[in-house]
């Protein structure tokens, strides 16, 4: 409840801030369009040579691309901007103001900045997924849809915790903006099912930088190829990371209040 | 009243020690530092004690690096004290209980919390949501603050288009929307012109009167302190140097008085009477030891064609400067 109330308040501020800069809207539109062309173009080329890619048909890969845009939009909408703002505010000291607020600091920080134009990616992702689902026909039932939402939530939580842990490092190492940019380029790998990659990279994308859980796993749920191990693994990892990131956050905050001048 | 009100702020033997890792000069030493860091302890606040009564406005003075901001941060819950007691409104600040945070505010002249690209009114709305201020109370507080600080024309302009003084007024309003009973002001008038300083000063006095708020104020401008604070707390090198009335601060730390004499010209040699600070168009300023003031005055009047004569305490600014110059590490 508190979360939604504050989210609405921060969202409103972001809308007010952004409508004054409409050019950002067009830049984002263009960027999303480019990314879309690259994705669909790649798909078209590949599927002109083959019918299946690592066991995934064209419509299924299309659904994955939809998830890729959807999750990328969620990251760009709230997770990444909030964490960038956190790193900035540790450096310039304005985190002090957040700390004097009578609300959980992690909550305020996490929704503290919203890049509303990334809603374009979310809408586009939903559109692509819908198109892919229509192409897949009646193969998607209620159960699958439910599993998809669960996996999407788990993936979102995992990515959020991952970002939070990285950003929390700024309590110890003040200059680490670039760490988030590295993630951005790694996320590109999520356009394709992780099963296509060589084992070392697959493990890396699953456990080191958990992009597999953000895109491949929800797409697996959507296309009915999710197994129980993955499902439990995703939910378990989400819960575990939630706890770990919270612990690191609190230690970081204690460090901040213990050492900063 | 059978029982006395508990103090709004109570600190006793408060200490804050920063552990600073030392960077050695030279490449070799720097490399060695990567492996084994040498760290030293720097006491920023070194055992200070004072209480503030509810509704008091107290000036908190000290040169840069004296430990003022560190103390304010401990009082507002941002920093853990290394040792000592600290209670604010009955709460332990660093626990950062929500009821405590709802009753305090920290306004810093050098940092801003308003969102840069949007009008201040939207940042106010954000604070309303965060502090859960009921709509009717929010409206009446906002109206009151708008009137007192003359914010009307500023509220709907993007913050980045405001002048420094206008922005500061909005910052102060943003910090007071939830009507805190405990107000920590860290250099609220820094960099502002004299008119704006005066405006903010009278606002602080008004807020204190109207809401009975306790105010702890740091400032480099003695005019702020003289106008607002009967009591001052002076710290230096993390230690308490003085705590009491502003007037007794003057008594305690001045051993000199200033005598301003109007003569016809600047020809007379006044060195034998005291230290000549200046002589402009026949207006001579002399510094004399406090104990000899009466005697010197008498001799001046007897010896010279004095048109006018005035005995004063030295300006408080100069006094504070001298207090700080007495290095007492």
Image: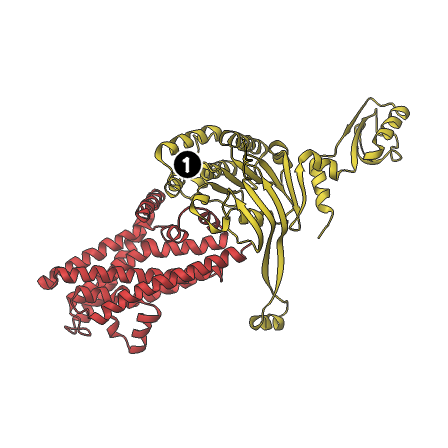
Q: Secondary structure at mark 1?
A: loop
Where residue A197 sits in the image (x, y, percent)? 27, 75
Instruction: Name which residue lies at 31% across and 74% down.
Output: A203
**In front of the other: B74 or A87:** B74
Q: Is residue B33 above or below residue A122?
A: below
Instruction: Name which residue lies at 16% across and 71% down.
Output: A48
Where residue B199 sits in the image (x, y, percent)? 54, 31
Q: Is residue B54 above or below residue B47?
A: above
| Quadrant in the rendering for residue B254 | top right
Is residue A204 in sight in this rendering? Answer: yes
Point out the residue furthest to the bottom here: A199
Quadrant in which the N terminus of chain B appears: top right
Point out the residue furthest to the left here: A138
Instruction: Name which residue lies at 45% across and 60% down.
Output: A251
Where residue A66 sits in the image (x, y, percent)? 21, 60
Q: For the image shown, how many numbered marks are present on the structure? A: 1
**In front of the other: B53 or B262:** B53
Assess disc 1: are there few (<14), some (14-19) or many (≥20) residues with their C-alpha within 10 Å of its C-alpha. Answer: some
Where residue A193 sits in the image (x, y, percent)? 24, 70
Q: Is residue A4 left or right of residue A165?
A: left
Give the chain of mark 1. B
* Colour treatment of the image: by chain
Q: Colour of chain A?
A: red
Q: Is residue B146 above or below residue A59?
A: above
Question: Which chain wears yellow?
Answer: B
Q: Is residue B313 above or below residue A115?
A: above
Q: Is residue A163 left or right of residue A170?
A: left
> Which residue corresponds to mark 1?
B157
| Quadrant in the rendering for residue B299 | top right
**In front of the other: B232 or A94:** B232
């Amino acid at each position: 409840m508190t979360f939604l109330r504050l989210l609405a308040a921060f969202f409103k501020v972001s809308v007010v801030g952004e409508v004054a800069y409409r050019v950002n809207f067009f830049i984002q539109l263009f960027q999303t369009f480019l990314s879309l062309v690259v994705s669909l173009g790649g798909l078209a080329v590949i599927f002109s040579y083959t019918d299946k890619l690592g066991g995934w048909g064209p419509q299924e890969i299309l659904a994955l691309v939809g998830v890729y845009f959807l999750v990328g939009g969620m990251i760009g909408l709230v997770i990444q901007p909030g964490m960038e703002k956190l790193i900035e505010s540790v450096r310039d000291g304005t985190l002090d103001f957040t700390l004097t607020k009578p609300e959980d600091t992690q909550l305020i920080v996490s929704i503290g900045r919203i890049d509303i134009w990334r809603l374009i990616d979310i809408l586009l992702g939903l559109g692509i997924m819908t198109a892919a689902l229509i192409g897949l026909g009646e193969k998607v039932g209620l159960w699958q849809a439910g599993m998809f939402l669960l996996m999407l939530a788990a993936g979102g939580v995992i990515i959020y915790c991952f970002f939070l842990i990285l950003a929390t490092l700024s309590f110890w190492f003040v200059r680490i903006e670039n760490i988030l940019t590295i993630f951005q380029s790694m996320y590109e790998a999520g356009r394709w099912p992780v099963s296509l990659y060589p084992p070392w990279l697959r493990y890396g994308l699953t456990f080191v930088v958990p992009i597999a859980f953000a895109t491949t796993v929800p797409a697996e749920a959507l296309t009915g190829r999710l197994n129980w191990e993955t499902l439990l693994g995703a939910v378990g990892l989400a819960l575990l990371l939630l706890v770990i990131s919270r612990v690191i956050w609190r230690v970081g905050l204690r460090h901040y209040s213990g050492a900063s001048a | 009243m059978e029982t006395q009100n508990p103090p709004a702020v109570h600190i006793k033997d408060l200490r804050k020690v920063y552990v600073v890792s030392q960077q050695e000069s030279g490449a070799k030493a720097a490399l060695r530092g990567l492996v084994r860091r040498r760290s030293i302890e720097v006491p920023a606040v070194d055992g200070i004690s004072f209480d503030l009564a509810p509704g008091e406005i107290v000036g908190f003075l000290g040169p840069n690096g004296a430990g003022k901001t560190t103390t304010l941060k401990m009082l507002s819950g941002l920093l853990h004290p290394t040792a000592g007691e600290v209670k604010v409104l009955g709460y332990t600040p660093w626990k950062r209980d929500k009821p405590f945070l709802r009753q305090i505010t920290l306004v810093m002249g050098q940092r801003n919390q308003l969102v840069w690209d949007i009008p201040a009114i939207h940042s106010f709305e954000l604070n309303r949501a965060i502090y859960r201020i009921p709509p009717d109370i929010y409206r009446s507080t906002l109206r009151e603050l708008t009137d007192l600080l003359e914010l009307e024309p500023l509220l709907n302009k993007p913050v980045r288009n405001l002048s420094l003084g206008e922005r500061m007024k909005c910052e102060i309003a943003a910090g007071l929307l939830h009507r805190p009973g405990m107000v920590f002001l860290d250099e609220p008038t820094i960099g502002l012109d004299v008119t704006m300083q005066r405006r903010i000063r009278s606002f602080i006095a008004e807020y204190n009167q109207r809401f009975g708020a306790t105010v702890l104020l740091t400032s480099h401008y003695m005019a702020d302190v003289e106008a607002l604070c009967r009591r001052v707390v002076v710290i230096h090198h993390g230690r308490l140097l003085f705590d009491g009335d502003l007037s007794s601060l003057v008594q305690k730390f001045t051993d000199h008085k200033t005598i301003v004499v109007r003569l016809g010209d600047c020809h007379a040699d006044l060195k034998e009477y005291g230290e000549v600070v200046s002589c402009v168009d026949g207006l001579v300023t002399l510094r004399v030891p406090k104990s000899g003031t009466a005697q010197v005055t008498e001799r001046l009047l007897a010896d010279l064609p004095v048109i006018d004569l005035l005995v004063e305490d030295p300006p408080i600014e100069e006094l504070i400067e001298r207090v700080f110059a007495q290095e007492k590490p």
